[in-house]
Amino acid sequence: MVVFLQDLTVTTEIPLVFPITNEMNDPIADMIIRMKNAGEAGKQFVVVPYSKMKFAIAELLEEEGFIKAIARKGKKDGKLIEIELAYENDSPRIKGVERVSKSSRRVYLKSKNIKPVKNYFGLLILTTPRGVMTNKEARHEKVGGEALFKIW
């Protein structure tokens, strides 16, 4: 098929950099990868679909300084989480992420098996019976759970 330049039309719509869809297999992985990619691209904000788990993770990352601010937008069906990324010296605070527990392979850790990430420069985020917490908090409270992801 041949397309001529005069056949192309110019649109004034600005496409979303990160499309918002509800058709994803791993919404937590989608959220952390969006944050990492947006930071590498120099973006200030990231918008992800809302869920209670993702909002709890975002609150924890805000407490730990990986993101600057979070806001819940929309009502009922169109709920979104708007995340403002944190930067230090024009470099994103999120350098890397690694999903540990996936839908195909769940990883559960006892409190004594929780190890530091990147020589204490990173965090392991876990879901425990006491809620979402970091590896430091889980070891301190002597509680284990499902290891969601590592972030540094």
Image (tube, grey):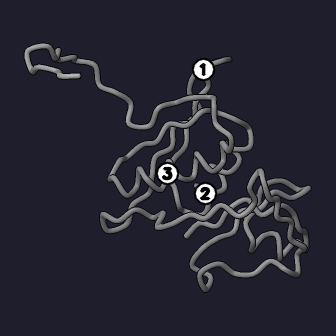
Binning the other alpha carbons within 10 Å of mark 2 as few (below 14), some (14 to 19) or many (20 upward) gives many
Residue occupied by mark 2: 61
- Rendered-image quadrant of the N terminus: top left
Residue 95, position as x, y percentages in the image: 46, 67
Res 78 label: 1
Three-letter residue code for mark 2: Leu
Residue 64 image point, x, y percent: 60, 63
When asked about the image quadrant of residue 27, the answer is: top right
Q: Residues within 10 Å of mark 3 (few under 14, many from 20)?
A: many
Residue at image location 39% in from the left, 61% down from the top: 87
* Three-letter residue code for mark 1: Gly
Q: Position of 59 compared to 35: left or right?
A: right
Secondary element type, mark 2: helix
Mark 1 vs 3, N-terminal side = 3
Look at the numbered disc 1 and give the secondary structure of its residue. Answer: helix
Looking at the image, residue 125 lies above or below residue 71: below
- Among all residues in the image, which is located at the extreme bottom? 119
Q: Are marks 1 and 3 in contact (CB under 8 Å)?
A: no
Mark 3 and mark 2: Cα distance apart in space:
11 Å
Q: CA distance from mark 1 to mark 2?
A: 23 Å
Mark 3 element type: helix
